[in-house]
Amino acid sequence: TGAITIDPGYKNSGSCTSNITFLDGEQGILRYRGYSIEDLAEKSNFLEVAYLLIFGELPTAAQIEKFEKDIRKYTLVNEEMKNIIDGFPRTAHPMGVLASLTSALTAFNPKSVNVDNEKEMYEAVCKTMAKFLVIATWTYRKNMGYPLNYYDNTKGYVENFMRLMFELPTGPYKMNPVVVNALDKLFILHADHEQNCSTSTVRMVGSSHAGLFASISSGVSALWGPLHGGANQAVLEMLEAIQKDGGDVEKFLAKAKDKNDPFRLMGFGHRVYKNFDPRARIIKKAADEVLADLGVDDPVLDIAKKLEKAALEDEYFKSRNLYPNVDFYSGIIYRAMGIPTEMFTVLFAIGRLPGWIAQWKEMRVNKEPIGRPRQVYTGSPLRDFTDINNR
Ligand code: CMC
């Protein structure tokens, strides 16, 4: 087997070849299947991008109509899933509940476990796109004590997200097209990011031929961490903490620079982007537009701007190439839309779902071997067993 190279965090190791997403961290380029993220964010929509990522080409009008129709076929979620939700305390974090519910979907859709042909694969894709959106919103409804909503098959995918979240039995939910458009754009920007932590997890779990739901569930768990998708919640909490503390951004910058303090500037830095995060640029602009349209004057946004400026001028951040990432601004938009902070990472998961599915599918279609890294053992050499009385 030869010498083993150790590369903790896989900073310089590739795990696969992929036709899905191109990323150039030095130049801040991100493309899905060859299309620039800027173009897609401006001209496409989330379901079309999902189709592109999963099936490789932008859909024709007939293809996207069929895809939407096939997703709608599966938007009902088994009533017994509600028993599982009822078992969680209301204080449960939505990401933990979402991971559990996604895994539980396997029990109610046993056919989705073994996908051996194209037809089964397609069915599993549509089911996941349909049911994941519904259960994602249920994690919030349950915590609020609201009745759980069902997908409205007369409305679009992103509109349904807002309805599922906020429509109450007392009357129809008034859709704001500015909010729906901004959310659509945010989902596009989150849709894939090649071999990030959660996507690598999905591919790794799937490489043992675990089913799609089980693989996606592990992706949700990986995304939850504050160094990954959980950063969007952490950013907002950090900005609120700065506000509460009197708004002194320099004090928090100093904390972030202090190597004896575990505090990091949330929403700053990236493993691969070393000049800027192209998604953050688009989101920053969208944040300004949404806030202006909704007439939101958010003091937290002022703190974000102050903090960003100070960090970008600071030698510590400059010398380490630490720039605001996608999570720095997304939370500000979510907050303006009335999304509770605890749900921010769930929105990231909804956006990332097509990427997880596409990468899982690619891994299976390419018949990749089971993921099984090597190690170098650094523990004790052979020792004699000591009887319990002599230890
Ligand atoms: N605040 C202060 N110092 C930082 C930060 C930060 N946010 N990020 C990196 N550094 C420092 C780090 O201490 C190290 O310094 P030194 O060379 O003196 O030891 C240097 O910069 C390199 O950092 P690293 O930890 O080796 O870099 P990494 O590639 O392993 O980590 C990261 C990347 C994103 C985990 C990290 O930058 C971080 O923790 N950022 C804050 C959390 C965050 O915003 N995550 C969202 C990432 S983007 C979207 C997503 O994946 O969800």
Image: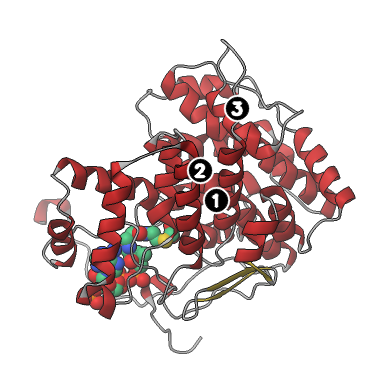
Q: Residue at x 37, y 63 (%)?
A: 324
Looking at marks 3 and 2 on the same chain, the residue that comes earlier in the sequence is marked by: 3
Which is more toward the observer, 267 or 365?
Answer: 267
Q: Which amino acid does label 2 sit on?
A: Leu
Looking at marks 2 and 1 on the same chain, the residue that comes earlier in the sequence is marked by: 1
Q: Distance between the residues labelled 1 and 3?
A: 17 Å
Q: Which disc number belongs to residue 186? A: 1
Q: What residue type is labelled 3?
A: Arg
x and y percentages locating residue 197 in the rendered image:
46, 61
Asked if 202 appears above or below 381 in the picture, the reply is: above
Would you say the beta carbon of the disc 2 residue lies within 8 angstroms of ligand 1?
no
- Asked whether, in this view, residue 275 is left or right of residue 353, the answer is left
State if disc 1 and disc 2 touch (CB < 8 Å): yes
Q: Name the residue under label 3.
A: 163
Q: Mark 2 points at which residue?
A: 347
x and y percentages locating residue 149 in the rendered image:
60, 21
Asked if 4 appears above or below 101 in the picture, the reply is: below
Which is more toward the observer, 225 or 156?
Answer: 156
The residue most toward the top is: 170
Crowding at label 3, few (<14), some or many (≥20) Cα neighbours within 10 Å? Answer: many
SS under mark 3: helix
